[in-house]
Image (cartoon, rainbow, N blue to C red):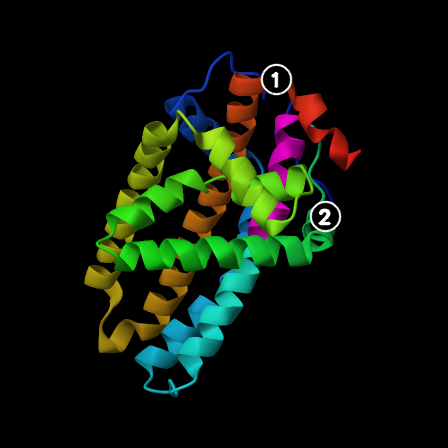
């Protein structure tokens, strides 16, 4: 089974890097291929949903948090790798096959996991150091996973590649990440205010799980499109040249 954007989707070849264009295009790609992209993200978000359920039912043990954090890190990285492939297929106006997207992501299992863990650890340390270093790290390595998948680089090489690509564009990338973060926090607050009560725990867990999966799906699509747009802006490369590794 494949999903596709339809005949009116149009070829995506931006003449310059534009965060507003990337943000809007990410929405089109996500909702034009919703079931595949959201489904991949939802599978990766299962540990978070289970954790919320256990926590609000008083069933969380001392080791649950560590296990969930580890699973969440691994599955999030893999789902992003899978969504990278799906997004490129959408940008190429090709149908998206869920099985192929999953298989392509799994092909890069160890490099993606390594890159994700390195970025996560360094960014986490940065946030502990008065937040600002963490924000800088987030912008510098924003396109690490797309670089790892598309260019088939190792973990440190992917981080270096992301640093090169984002150089000169980190303020716009920060703006995009901040906007997504504000929307996520606003959604979290709304869900907590309306559903986090003793009689609505099931609804709360389900809605929170779906919301997190949706945000993650969008973030993965957005980072891929930003990676694509940065390479177009800096290297003058077109979508078929970029995605030739998948053929």
Depth order, front residue of 157/145: 157
Q: Residues within 10 Å of mark 2 (few under 14, many from 20)?
A: many
Say if the magenta span includes residue 85. yes
Closer mark to the observer between disc 2 and disc 1 = 2
Per the rendering, the mark at residue 11 is 1
Quadrant for the C terminus in the image: top right
Identify the main secondary structure in magenta. helix
Per the rendering, the mark at residue 32 is none
Q: Which residues are magenta?
A: 79-93
**In the rendered image, which residue does mark 2 sit on?**
104
Does the rendering let one see residue 25?
Answer: yes
Left or right side of 16 for 145: right
Residue 90 in the image: above or below residue 100: above
Does the rendering let one see residue 40?
Answer: no
Q: Residue at x 48, y 77 (%)?
A: 67
Depth order, front residue of 236/29: 236
Residue 195 in the image: above or below residue 173: below
Q: What is the count of numbered marks?
A: 2
Say if the magenta span includes residue 184. no
Quadrant for the N terminus in the image: top right
Q: Residues within 10 Å of mark 1 (few under 14, many from 20)?
A: few
Depth order, front residue of 54/161: 161
Residue 40 pos. (x, y %) = 58, 53
Residue 145 pos. (x, y %) = 56, 45
Residue 235 in the image: above or below residue 165: above
Q: Disc 2, disc 1: CB below 8 Å?
A: no
Residue 66 pos. (x, y %) = 44, 77
Depth order, front residue of 6/104: 104
């Amino acid at each position: 089974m494949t999903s596709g954007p339809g005949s009116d989707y149009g070829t995506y070849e931006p003449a310059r890097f534009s965060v507003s264009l990337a943000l809007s295009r990410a929405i089109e790609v996500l909702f034009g291929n919703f079931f595949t992209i959201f489904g991949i993200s939802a599978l990766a978000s299962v540990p978070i949903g289970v954790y919320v359920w256990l926590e609000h039912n008083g069933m969380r043990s001392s080791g649950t948090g560590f296990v969930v954090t580890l699973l969440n890190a691994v599955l999030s990285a893999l789902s992003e790798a899978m969504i990278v492939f799906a997004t490129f297929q959408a940008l190429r106006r090709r149908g998206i096959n869920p099985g192929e997207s999953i298989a392509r992501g799994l092909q890069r299992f160890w490099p993606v996991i390594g890159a994700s863990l390195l970025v996560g650890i360094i960014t986490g340390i940065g946030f502990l150091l008065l937040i600002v270093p963490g924000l800088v790290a987030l912008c510098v390595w924003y396109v690490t996973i797309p670089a790892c998948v598309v260019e088939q680089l190792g973990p440190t090489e992917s981080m270096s590649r992301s640093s090169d690509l984002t150089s000169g564009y980190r303020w716009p990338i920060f703006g995009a990440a901040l906007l997504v973060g504000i929307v996520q926090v606003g959604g979290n607050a709304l869900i907590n205010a309306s559903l986090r009560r003793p009689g609505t725990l099931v609804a709360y867990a389900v809605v929170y799980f779906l919301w997190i999966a949706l945000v993650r799906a969008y973030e993965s699509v957005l980072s891929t499109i930003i990676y694509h747009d940065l390479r177009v802006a800096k290297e003058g490369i077109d979508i078929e040249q970029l995605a030739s590794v998948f053929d």
